[in-house]
Amino acid sequence: MGDSIDKELTALAEAIDSQCEGDGAQSTPLPGLSLARVTTPSHPLQTTYDAAVCVIAQGRKQAMLGDQRFEYGAGNYLLVSIDVPVTGQIVEASAKKPYLSLLLELDSDILGELILQAGSEAERAEQLHPSLAVANASPQLLDAATRLVRLLQTPEDLAALGKPTKQEIFYWLLKGRCGAQLRQISQSESKLQQVNRAVTWLKQHFRERVHADDLADIASMSASALYKHFRIITNMTPLQYQKQLRLQEARRLMLFDALDAGSASHAVGYESPSQFSREYSRLFGAPPMKDLARLREAPAELRYV
């Protein structure tokens, strides 16, 4: 890593650390921006990553999308172009050198404005990419990220400069290796956005029985095209995607609402308790009660970092 990158990473790490109180993911007054500080490696945690960019200032993390592994550490960013259920794990963190990152939700309106201001139309590339991508952050991107975090210290400056600094971050992202994926986000009829319509429906109706033709109509694709493009982008089929959403929600209901396994499985759309238990064990590595006991041992603030 070059001297300029090291300098920018040190500045970003100090800015994030100064804004965090204890361990865990922490929201900020700026909509769409959150910070994370963790001093111990975590167990693999299943959650849904929203469309966002995560910039790592210190430490290392990995994410599993289906059977694809993405590792990213200091100086990298993870781009998530569409909401997907993943397994995330912090693999490098300590009290002396905590894991430090910022998460900024993607804004299709800002991205669209930047593309128009550049005086060129968004690329209509047919090639699709997985919804997760890892790339190296440029010194300019790290500098803008640091200035955004420092604005949290002065609310009066944040109100005036928060959005322009977010725009600058998106600008440098568009100029980087993941620019093509970001351009597709701003295109209302890109294949990414067509698949996203199916994803949105599944997130809102995951308890319901899914019919391939109906889901294809929502995406304005044939059933075969949706299956193909959905799998490329999410590394899973629509039914596998729905299953992960169901199981994650059942886990949440048991952990936070104290539902038993039978009630939780019924609440998320399962008709067979035995099928629920088998699929739960396959995803989380243990039956419901054993998994919940293990999860309750983790500090609450780290369960979904």
Image (cartoon, rainbow, N blue to C red):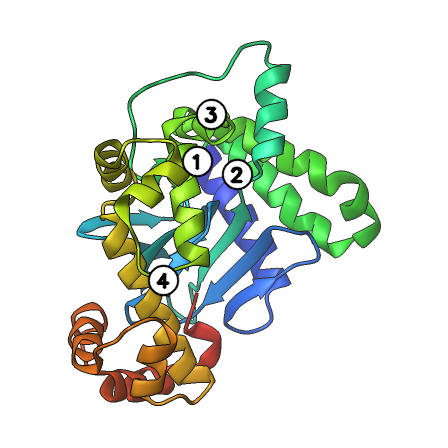
In the picture of the structure, the residue carrying the numbered disc 1 is 137
Which mark is first along the chain, 3 or 4? 3
Label 4 residue SS: loop
Q: Residue at x 58, y 38 (%)?
A: 107
Residue 183 is marked as 3
Q: What residue sits 43% from the left and 41% below the top?
A: 197
Amino acid identity at mark 1: Ala
Seen in the picture, residue 55 relative to 174 is either above or below; the reply is below
- Tell me which label, 2 or 4, sits earlier in the chain: 2
Residue that label 2 marks: 142
Residue type pointed to by label 3: Arg
CA distance for labels 2 and 4: 43 Å
Q: Residues within 10 Å of mark 1 (few under 14, many from 20)?
A: many
How packed mark 2 is, by other alpha carbons closer than 10 Å (few <14, some 14-19, many 20 or more), is many
Give the image location of residue 272, x and y in percent: 21, 78
- Residue shown at 29% from the left, 44% from the top: 234
Q: Are marks 3 and 1 in contact (CB under 8 Å)?
A: no
User: Upstream in the sequence, badge 2 or badge 1?
Assistant: 1
Q: Nearer the viewer, mark 3 or mark 1?
A: 3
Q: Residues within 10 Å of mark 3 (few under 14, many from 20)?
A: many
Provide the secondary structure element on which disc 1 rests: loop
- Marks 2/1: CA–CA distance: 7 Å
Q: Nearer the viewer, mark 2 or mark 3?
A: 3
For the residues bearing labels 4 and 1, Cβ distance under 8 angstroms: no
Q: Mark 2 touching mark 1, by CB under 8 A?
A: yes
